[in-house]
């Protein structure tokens, strides 16, 4: 056995379509083996277990010699993009009702419960009003039976978190449910955005806990006793226990891991890196060998959070994205995404005869049904415990516990909308035509039997647009149109990221002029829109689509070796990186307050306050680094100070001590 046996790392990425696994040798920086398995959404253990078993066999390594396991996942990202998550209640302390309209909070809340109670603090950490524990207790008792967790945000809790802590203790004592406090996830002001972040975290605790527990069980069964690390959205690693409490920080975990893997695989210092998977396309700009962090926090699925993440754009555009006919007055434009469905060729693995019979029925019908080539798979395990409205209940009764063609159970627009809601909540799985099916029709992909995809493409080609014209003259022409739609939409998204990186508005990529340039429409004018840096394509479908995207954008495309498992490689090579900021303010001349989480410390001179802030930030980072799995680390300290000149006299306004800890996970 090689001398580096005790330096082996198992990297695992659970994507929307595939679960990837790699064995990476820490000592020689070498990829020993890689493997893939289909992600099993209803039971993640299946896909993870199969991928781990395959990579261990390929590497021929002793499972007991694995130093640690690093896990990246698109679970949280996909949940936000697709609008899924466990029900949670938001407790807001010291806020007026009007705050719900700020920062996208009302959109994030949706149908979840909101509890408003008195309390909170001033900007200087002084209690503004006592916490109304009696009202809180009554509201929590009423709401608890219908939720899986709580999120708590108190006014100016980053200056004094006493009320959030008291509320958390009360809720846990009365309900036993998980509670997320906003000050634990964000150290900046802006109550609405902290509330968005905390609520999303509360919704995801069950999802990530299930993933970590499942992974742990799979590893135990494989004889791997190594600790588990998880990739956060900023590309850093943390321990499994750490992330169980803060699952929202795994937003963009998979994309961040793919970027780390790309940086490891290619030597370009300037590039646009795009990772296309089954569910999403994730795009980021590499400048001078570095990725930027989003200045305002990660935005995913329309939710603006305070989660530190690599600056990237995530779009519901992938190989398994649903193909739809654009809702326009004229023309037969196709739209790909944003919803992920099960490709028909995948469903055909176990239901080929059924799909063929239904497609034949649709093709020979007098009219092509509105829900053509779409089928409903069996309801998920969560469906039996879900609360449904009347239309949803009747629809689920008609579907039952079987696979069924959509046009056999959807009776009008209300049913069609209900299916969308059920799918978004993760209660109903759908199978429909996707770019993956189109690739099988065209022969650019041969993973599955193409017969069902061919039949479905024929049904689609007979579909008429709003002018009564057939969408395509043949199944192959329709498949080419689907591929062209994905290429065109991808090019626009890539160009938007490049424009943003250059300080311009991403909206420019969707402008009439840029659209005309990409579509090649001008005759008398010359319009050019493209990329001035190479395009690095990652993900299993990259080789299928990205050469054409590069041609459209006029740039070189590089698809590096092992790009198909870049996520898992990035997970394996990442580091633990944690940051803590402590703010110092001066509410009046000669008084300096250091905000440490609970009641602030007060000083009468700036220098002792500054030193205390740095010390507190360093101590917090040191403790967190150990908890995150890196007991050996380096610290980087920064002090940023704001002051104003008043009649020639410099007055201190605010100072921020930032301490960043960086280290590799403990390998022993």
Image (cartoon, rainbow, N blue to C red):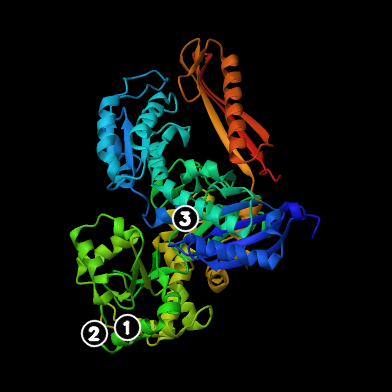
Residue 82 lies left or right of residue 623; in this view the side is: left
3D distance between C-alphas at marks 2 and 1: 14 Å
Q: Quadrant of the N terminus?
A: bottom right
3D distance between C-alphas at marks 3 and 2: 39 Å
- Would residue 29 be visible to someone looking at this image? yes
- Viewer-closest of 216 and 602: 216
Which mark is on residue 287?
Answer: none
> Which element is circle 1 on?
helix
> Which element is circle 3 on?
helix
CB of mark 3 within 8 Å of CB of mark 2?
no
Residue 238 position within the rendered picture, expressed as x and y whole percent measured from the top left: 58, 44
The residue pinned by badge 3 equals 75
- Would residue 530 be visible to someone looking at this image? no
- Viewer-closest of 6 and 511: 6
> Which element is circle 2 on?
loop
> Mark 3 vs mark 2: which is more N-terminal?
3
The residue pinned by badge 2 equals 367
């Amino acid at each position: 056995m090689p001398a580096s046996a005790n330096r082996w790392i198992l990297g695992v990425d659970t994507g929307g379509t595939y679960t990837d696994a790699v064995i990476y040798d820490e000592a020689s920086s070498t990829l020993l083996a890689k493997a893939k398995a289909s992600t099993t959404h209803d039971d993640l253990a299946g896909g993870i277990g199969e991928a781990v078993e395959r990579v261990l066999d390929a590497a021929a390594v002793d499972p007991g010699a694995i130093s640690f396991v690093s896990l990246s996942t698109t679970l949280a990202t996909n949940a936000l993009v697709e609008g899924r998550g466990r029900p949670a209640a938001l407790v807001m302390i010291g806020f007026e009702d009007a705050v719900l309209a700020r920062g996208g909070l009302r959109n994030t809340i949706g149908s979840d419960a909101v509890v408003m109670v008195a309390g909170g603090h001033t900007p200087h950490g002084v209690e503004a009003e006592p916490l109304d524990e009696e009202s809180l207790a009554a509201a929590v008792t009423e709401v608890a039976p219908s939720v899986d967790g709580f999120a708590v945000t108190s006014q100016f809790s980053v200056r004094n978190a006493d009320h959030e802590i008291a509320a958390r203790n009360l809720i846990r004592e009365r309900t036993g449910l998980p509670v997320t406090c906003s000050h634990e996830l964000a150290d900046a002001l802006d109550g609405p955005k902290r509330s968005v972040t905390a609520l999303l975290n509360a919704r995801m605790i069950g999802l990530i806990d299930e993933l970590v527990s499942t992974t742990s069980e799979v590893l135990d069964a494989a004889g791997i006793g190594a600790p588990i690390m998880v990739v956060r959205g900023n590309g850093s690693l943390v321990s499994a226990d750490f992330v169980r409490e803060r699952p929202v920080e795994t937003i963009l975990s998979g994309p961040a891991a793919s970027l780390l893997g790309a940086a490891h695989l290619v030597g370009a210092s300037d590039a646009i890196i795009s990772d296309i998977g089954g569910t999403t396309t994730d795009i980021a700009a590499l400048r001078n060998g570095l990725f930027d962090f989003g200045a305002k926090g990660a935005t995913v699925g329309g939710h603006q959070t305070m989660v530190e993440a690599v600056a990237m754009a995530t779009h519901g555009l992938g190989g398994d994205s649903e193909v739809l006919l654009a809702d326009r007055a004229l023309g037969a434009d196709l739209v790909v995404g944003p919803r992920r469905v099960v490709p028909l060729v995948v469903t055909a693995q176990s239901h080929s005869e059924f799909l063929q019979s239904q497609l034949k029925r649709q093709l020979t019908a007098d009219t092509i049904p509105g829900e053509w080539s779409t089928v409903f798979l069996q309801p998920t395990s969560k469906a039996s415990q879900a609360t449904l409205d009347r239309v949803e209940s009747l629809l689920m009764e008609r579907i039952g516990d079987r696979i069924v063609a959509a046009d056999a159970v959807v009776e009008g627009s209300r049913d069609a909308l209900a299916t969308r809601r059920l799918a978004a909540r993760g209660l109903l799985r759908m199978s429909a035509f996707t770019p993956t099916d189109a690739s099988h029709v065209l022969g650019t992909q041969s993973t599955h039997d193409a017969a069902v995809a061919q039949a479905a493409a024929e049904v689609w080609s007979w579909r008429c647009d709003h002018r009564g014209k057939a969408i395509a003259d043949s199944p192959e022409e329709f498949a080419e149109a689907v591929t062209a739609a994905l290429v065109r939409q991808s090019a626009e998204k890539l160009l938007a990221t490049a424009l943003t990186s250059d300080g311009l508005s991403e909206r420019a990529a969707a402008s009439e002029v840029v659209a005309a340039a990409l579509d090649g429409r001008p005759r008398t004018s010359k319009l050019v829109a493209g990329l001035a840096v190479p395009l690095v394509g990652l993900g299993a479908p990259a080789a299928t689509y990205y050469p054409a995207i590069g041609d459209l954008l006029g740039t070189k495309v590089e698809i590096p070796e092992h790009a198909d498992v870049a996520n898992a490689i990035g997970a394996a090579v990442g580091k633990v990186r944690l940051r803590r900021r402590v703010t110092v303010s001066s509410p009046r001349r000669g008084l300096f307050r250091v905000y440490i989480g609970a009641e602030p410390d007060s000083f009468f001179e700036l220098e002792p306050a500054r030193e205390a802030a740095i010390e507190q930030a360093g101590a917090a980072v040191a403790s967190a680094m150990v908890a995150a799995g890196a007991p050996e680390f380096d610290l980087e300290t920064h002090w940023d100070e704001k002051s104003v000149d008043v009649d020639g006299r410099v007055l201190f306004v605010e100072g921020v001590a930032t301490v960043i800890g960086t280290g590799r996970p403990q390998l022993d």
